[in-house]
Structure formats: C-alpha cells, structure tokens
Amino acid sequence: MAKVKTIIVFGGTGFIGYHVCKRAVKKNFKVFSVSKKPPKIKRKIKGVKYLFFDITKYTNFKKIENSFNIVVNASGYGKHLKGSSGLKLFNSHRKGFDNILKNFKNKKIEKFIQIGSSFEYKENNFPLKESNKTKPKSYYGKAKLLITKNLLNLYKKNKFPVTILRIFQAYGPMQDNNRLIPYVISGLKKNKKIFLSEGNQIRDFCYIDDIVNAIFLSIRNKSSNGRILNIGSGEGINIINLVSKIHNLIRKGEFYFNRRKLHHGESKIIIPDITLSKKILKWRPKIKLNIGLKKTIASK
C-alpha cells in the first residue's frame, strides 16, 4: 500500500491555495494549510488541517510539527501598492518567504512549488517567454522576483527541488471580488453600475482548474526542477471585450470605462508563451474563456 503523501500549502485559505487544498484532499493527500486568518466559511474544506500564524515571525513555525513531502507557497497579498505601503508589502513577502525557506531548505522534501507572477517580467508587447528580461514595476512584482532568484540559486547550489510557476490572471469560483472578473460578475448580477479603467489593456485569463492541474503535474515532474514555467491560457483578450462577454452572459447591470486609474505598475499587454509548460509538464489549458466565465457566473 502506497504511503500517504503530506502537503503543506502556505496561503491555503486564499484563492489559489484553497483550490490546491481541495484538489489535494480529493487525491487523498494529508493536507495542511497555513494562513494568518481562518478561511471564510465557504472556503473551509473538510479534511484540511488548518494552522493560523504570521509567517513573517520565525518562532511561529514551531506550530508545524509534521514532516512534509510537498510544499506549496501561495502566500502573500497580490496588491499593487506604492510608497510606504508597497515597501511594507515587499518586506512582508520577503520575510515570510525567508522563514518558509529557512524551515524547509535542509529537510528532505520531494517538491517545493512557488506560485510566481506575470508581474515579474519587464513590460513587453510580445508573448512573454520565461527567458524574457525581468524588471517589475510594482513592489509586488519585485518581491516575487526576489523570491524566484533565491530559489533558483538554491537549486543551482543544492539541487533544491523547486519549480516556479508564473501565473497569468487566475480566475474562477471562490475568487474574491477585489479581482476584475468576480468584481464585474458580482456587480452586474446585482444590476449595478460597474466603473472600470480605460479597458484597452490586453490580458490572459486562466481558469483555476487548469492552474491546479499544472501545479499537480509539477509536483510529480522532476524535469521541472529548477525551472520557471509560465501558466496561462496563451490567449490575450482586450478588457473591453472581456467585460462585454460577461455582460452578454448576465444581461443585467451597466459598465463604464475610463472611470478608474490603472493600477500602479500595470502593463498594457500581459500575454504568456506557454510552450515550455506544454513541453515539460505535458500540460495545456483545457477550459476556454466562455466556459470558464459561465462556470464562474454560475458559482456566484
């Protein structure tokens, strides 16, 4: 009988973390979630052992008593803040990661999955390859890039079994309304007026099930060790067209562009080249945008 694998997910009560934990339970993993606060009731999963503490304080890691096969770091706030608030966010990401690594780098784990970000890249109008230059504008992107560099250095020195997955605009059920798609869906379903930025940005939106598939393929794929892999749909869409699609499906509410400023450090075009992920992980996104939007709308 195969030994039950243990997985610990930092940021396990967040959007991506929640879906990773949910899939891990279905796969009969022994699942632990670490977060600062308890999950919302709708995100609480039967079979998950929840640990609540601040990862920026290393003494809190004493609460982790088990040994683990797999570590997934989906921790940290994905906000694009500037000034002192942005610097505080940067330091929080850095300290939290430093403590996670301090706790696990000398332990025998099978895999460390780092949830990276498309915001690590330098602004570029072409589909972004993993080999593209990195020059993030936001503190969030800078924090993610620093973590990526530290992990790759550790892989080069000690063959630390890490894979960095750079996620491009995740969406799907259970996402908070502070993200574009759930914000628009929630507002329109309530027959409200939705105010947006210029809408000319081009983005890649990847359904959460496809992202989780990539994470679990990475876990058992040794060829992905020491790699950065883009995870997205590989298809860009203009935000104006995206919102129009959602409105056509809901047929309620109103939307207005040019009513909000762009986020700090926001690029106009963010589309990934996912060739490497397809090759190494034998992965490809399966859920088309229209289907994903329908699933997300139905869950609200």
Image: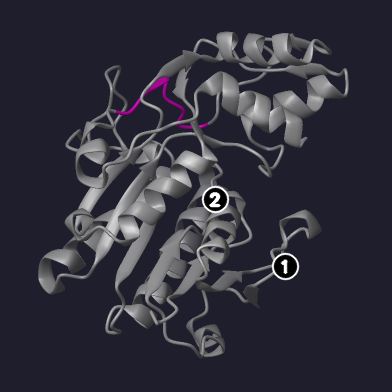
> Which SS does the magenta portion mostly show?
loop
Query: Residue at image x 17%, y 55%?
Result: 223
Q: Position of residue 257 (x, y in %)?
A: 66, 10
Three-letter amino acid code at disc 1? Pro
Q: Where is 274 relative to 192, above or below?
A: below
Per the image, the residue denoted by label 2 is 16
For residue 134, say whether it is visible. no
User: Is residue 56 shown in magenta?
Assistant: no
Q: Nearer the viewer, residue 264 or 1?
A: 1
Q: In this picture, which residue range is highlighted in magenta? A: 264-272
Residue occupying the far front of the picture: 1
Up/down of 94 relative to 100, above or below: above
Residue shown at 21%/52% (left/top)? Answer: 227
Q: Circle 2: is it few (<14), some (14-19), or many (20+) Cα within 10 Å?
A: many
Does residue 240 lie above or below 112 as drawn? above
Disc 1 designates what residue?
38
Q: Amino acid at mark 2?
A: Ile
Per the model, the C-alpha gap separating discs 2 and 1 is 15 Å
Name the N-terminal-most of marks 2 and 1: 2
Split into 4 quadrants, where in the image is the N terminus?
bottom left
On residue 110, which mark appears? none
The part of the image, by quadrant, that contains residue 107 is bottom left
Viewport quadrant of the C terminus: top right
Q: Secondary structure at mark 1?
A: loop
Which residue shows up at 48% across the image and 53% down it? Answer: 87
Residue 267 forms part of the magenta stretch = yes
Coordinates of residue 172 in the picture (x, y in percent) = 61, 37
CB atoms at circles 2 and 1 under 8 Å apart?
A: no
- Residue 24, above or below 176: below
